[in-house]
Amino acid sequence: MGLDDPWQQVVSAALLGTERQPFTVPMVSGKVGQLLTQVSHLSPEAALLTTAAILSLHRQAGWLPRTYPVVAQKPYQDDDLPRCSPRAACLLQQMLQGQYTQVLPEWLAIASKQRQRVPELYLPELLDAGRQQRDLRAAILLVLGQRGRWLAAQNPDWSYAVEVATEEDWETGSTAARLLYLQDLRSHQPDRARELLQGTWSQESAGDRAKFLEILRIELSMADEPFLEEKLGDRSKEVRRVAADLLANLPDSRLCQRMTERINALIPAKAHQDGIQIELPASCDTEMLRDGVGQSTPNRNLGEKANWLLQMIAGVPLRFWQQTFCQTPTELVKAAALSEWKTVLLDGWAQAARRHGDRDWAAAILNYSGKSARGQVCVEVLSEEQLEAVVIHELQSDPGQLNQLLWILQRHQNPWSVELAREVMHGLSNLVPETTVLWQLRSALEEFALRIPPELITEATDLRTTFEDNTILNSAIHHFLALLQFRYDMRQAFEQPSSVGHSIPQGAH
């Protein structure tokens, strides 16, 4: 007899109760039956519970475990990249554990440049860091090595390190997946990306159409102009806005030509000899609205018509002004400063300079505008060399005005030259001890430590003495020096010999 029937007898007896029906120990063969004979002398209640316990354990022990199909994984191939030095690995460990995390992008960049990989011990933590910080992913992929990519394939949370977007993602993926695919495709096959978008345009929602159209900003060219011109008539206001903005970035587009014609009609004939004079547009017609004029208010301190004029100026290629007035950008900026519409002209030119990446115009406008919203727009356009030249010139003229240049320095996100770094440190030493200035500097010092060449650590150490008695900056200077020292140690660590084998680096625990 199997155990199912005896078990059902026990269950039935338990439901009825031993008072209503006396319990009889069921007959079972084998060793279980022998064990049950030992409970027959117990009271009915005890016999029932003991029998239930014995049969329950036997039922569980008799079950076979569930099996699952196992997909055989290919073993990882040996890495062709050497592992970074043990010292560099230890510094990586510190960052992955939360210390000096802002230096991690630099560590990854150096490792990639040196063609070295991350030791196996730290792959899980690094892959987790990439899962949480999307901006690190591209750099992480370059230092994982074969083992890292193999490991990433074993965990869905690390799929970013192994998944490659395909055209299938565009056809069936989520909006986020489709955006990522189109963005990646646009960076190396811009025409194909535009063709895909054209193929599905009528099926997209208004919100998605605007998001997808924005991706055409990558590798934007005149090849996109016909498609964008067509989208000026889209049902969605946001799509029309994006299309107009993209077309304004193409100096040879039909939109820029129309803006130029409108502006030319607003310049009196005598203005060509008597400085920059310009009239306000009388109205904003349907064609102007289609080209993006009147869809927003760029400057709330200006009237409606002045804002229309500003938007038109921002859509005019800057070469028009030089050809019309036969003047350089610097001369035109000086002339605009004397015009009753100087704010409109300078704001519009600043936007045009950003759109077209015109550094000469940006430098001329920045020189006049200084720290203003307009000046900050121009700073985004300048090259690193131009930014450094501006700051170095100002600091050499007056080392004590460092605080007035913080807004430019904080936008210079790349490593500084030795000359700029020395001028900034000299400026720190000559800083006027005003409380407001010191608090501003306190928040900027960490960024300075990430930009100053680490080999200047010895010169930077002198700042500790300079601010030893300054309660506001003392701790910030110590952190600044510690961060700079960490970067110096990191660079030195990558000069040490790397390893190739599969053992865990010494000193990594």
Image (cartoon, helix red, strand yellow):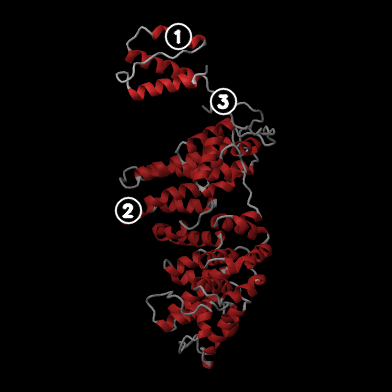
Between the residue at mark 2 and the residue at mark 1, the CA separation in whole angstroms equals: 91 Å
Q: Contact (CB < 8 A) between labels 3 and 1? A: no
Q: Where is residue 207 in the image (x, y as percent from the top left)?
A: 50, 66
First in residue order: circle 2 vs circle 1 = 1
Residue, disc 2: 433
Which labelled disc corresponds to residue 35?
A: 1
Badge 3 amino acid:
Gln
Residue, disc 3: 506
Query: Please, is residue 355 above or below residue 164 in the view?
Result: below
Estimate how packed mark 1 is, as few (under 14), some (14 to 19) or many (20 or more) residues with alpha carbons within 10 Å: some
Badge 1 amino acid:
Leu
Query: Please, is residue 249 above or below residue 27 in the view?
Result: below
Estimate how packed mark 3 is, as few (under 14), some (14 to 19) or many (20 or more) residues with alpha carbons within 10 Å: few
Q: Residue 397 appears in which quarter of the rendering? A: bottom left
Between the residue at mark 3 and the residue at mark 2, the CA separation in whole angstroms equals: 48 Å
Q: Position of residue 311 (x, y in %)?
A: 49, 78
Estimate how packed mark 2 is, as few (under 14), some (14 to 19) or many (20 or more) residues with alpha carbons within 10 Å: few
Q: Where is residue 59 in the image (x, y as percent from the top left)?
A: 48, 20
